[in-house]
Image (spheres, rainbow, N blue to C red):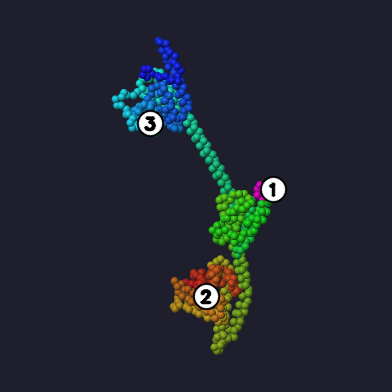
Amino acid sequence: MEPGSLSMDARSPERRPTPEGAPRIFRELEHAWRHLDHLYEISKRLTAFEGTERTFPEVMELATQVLPLRTALLLVGVDPDGEPLRAHPALTVWRAADVTAARIPRAIEQAVSRYGWLAGEKEVELREPVVGLAERVDGEPAEESGSAAPTFISLPLVSKGRVFGTLQVEAKGTLAEEGLAFLDAVTNQLGVALDRHCALRREVRLRERAEALERAQRELLRREREARHEAEAAHRRQAFLAEASALLAGSLDYRASLPGIARLLVPAWADCCAIDLFQKDLGSAERIAMMAVEPLGHPPGSESFVARVLASHPWGAFPASANHLPDEHRSVEQCEWSGFPANLRLLIRVRGRAVGVLSLISARPARYGLAEVTLFETLAQRIAAAVDAALLFQQAQEAVRWREELLAVVSHDIKTPLLVVRMNAEMLLKAARPPGDERRRQGRRQVEIILQAAEQMRDLIGGILDRARHQGMPMPLAPQPWTVEELVQPTLEVLRPLALDKHQTLMVEVGPELPRVRADRERILQVLSNLVGNAIKFTPANGTITLRARRVDGMVRVSVKDNGPGIAPKDVPHLFERFWRATSVNERGTGLGLSIVKSIVEAHGGSLWVETQPGAGSTFFFTLPLAG
């Protein structure tokens, strides 16, 4: 066989002898018949195309059964997604078993050059990695420098009139015309297979993109539905909170408003609601509101849910107990019991103190999530504010009632005996004139003290009535410069007979050269009378009361000390509250004295405080500003 002619596959039918001198056309038809068998095998292989890395070497192995090929380089300007990428083609290399790797670089250089010319690309850069390209192994002969230049044949791969790749082969010798025709047929089939494969990859990629877009759209729709649902739920929570707040603000009587809150909660937010408030001693609780309904979908004929709640639920059967509250740092408690899968209890706190609980019970599992718990925490805070406001209003009403009673006593019951004292003192004073001896002078002094006390009581009554008429306004003062002795001595003269009657010692210690103070004399006499009078009242017989005055930090500090029983620590914070009286004290009083003292001292710009120790007595201090 002459060089470059086609070989015959052993599997082809036995060739019939051609008569000598037969026409050339018969010989060409015979070659074509032999090619069809190989083209059919190549076509079958390309029909099951599995990618260039695997299919291309198999096709070239089949082609070598017809043509004496040494190397084959396939350049495809399509990316992995099947999209055109002509400037960066992918290269797949095949070489025959007897061909060294040293021949490949020259073939690649030639293939890239011809690909650029056929594809119309001026600059071509191969994509990595190059499939089938191997380094020369040790012992493998290098390409002979004196060998003849190889002959390369480059054929374009065409799709829809555009070149998308090339097939370059190197044959042993020169290929005959039928060999070129066979190679052209193989190239065409390879181009069709590659184009079909790229189209399939594009279709798969488009389908994947479409599926991804569809998933994204479904996710967006899901998120939109969730956002809409959450917005609706948030609007529902805000609407409920607004309605509950309006209901709580509509009345200062929580016994009227809290049952309305229970009706708002059931059945919209719970199947049962109970609101309990603790009594002052925190030992027991009063159920203010209770509301329960049968759950939606409750099977007829089964045991009543409401009956089970009232009979056996730990929170519904009985009012809450202060002894079974959750930890002080926890304001929310969630529990699950058999038959009661969703239970929520919240503390109602007023200024850090638990005053009650809000209990919610539901037959629906997992009914109370984080959003609902936050909503009911806010509701519990607003209930606490409403209860606090109602309690303060009740206290204010009670204080007003006590004030009115006190003013009635002052204006009616005290005026009459005061008038009697004044009239009799005036009569005694007239009877004592003219003064005769020392007894008459002493009697006259006592009568003058009675008149002085009467005048002081009259001023006190007038001041209280003024305070009542000017409720909430600043206390009127008429401050003037006074020595401490001028303020202390009148008080001692009035109260000394009371101390002598109990065999008590009344001592005065005023610092030397004490400066004058700026004060309203009548008001300060009221302060001293109250403090010294309390000391005489609560100090036992044979006790000692000491009144001291010192200059301290630019002020005059006055103290009244006794050695009585002292004051319990729990009572000290309440000493200066209006109408407050210690429960352990047997002496009668209105609970206003120290409150009035505090207001007078603060109106002068001073301070009032107490230091006490049970069993060792008490010392009351107050300060007055110096006269300018």
Q: Are marks 2 and 3 in contact (CB under 8 Å)?
A: no
Q: Main secondary structure of the magenta part?
A: loop
Q: Nearer the viewer, mark 1 or mark 2?
A: 1
Residue furthest bottom in the image:
437
Does dot 2 land on a helix, a strand or a loop? Answer: loop
Q: Quarter of the image containing the N terminus? A: top left
Q: Is residue 296 magenta?
A: yes
Helix, strand or loop at label 1? It is loop
Residue depicted at x 33% and y 32%: 138
User: x and y percent of residue 353 in the render?
Assistant: 56, 61
Q: Position of residue 176 (x, y in %)?
A: 38, 18
Amino acid type indicated by mark 3: Leu
Mark 1 highlights which residue? 300
List x then y, in percent, for residue 163.
42, 26
Picture quadrant where residue 71 is located: top left
Q: Is residue 153 above or below residue 397?
A: above
Residue that mark 3 sits on:
133
Quadrant of the rendered image containing residue 451: bottom right
In the picture of the structure, the residue carrying the numbered disc 2 is 616
Is residue 627 shown left or right of residue 497?
Answer: left
Can residue 476 be seen here? The reply is no
Residue closer to the observer: 126 or 381: 126
Q: What's the CA distance linking mark 2 and mark 3?
A: 107 Å
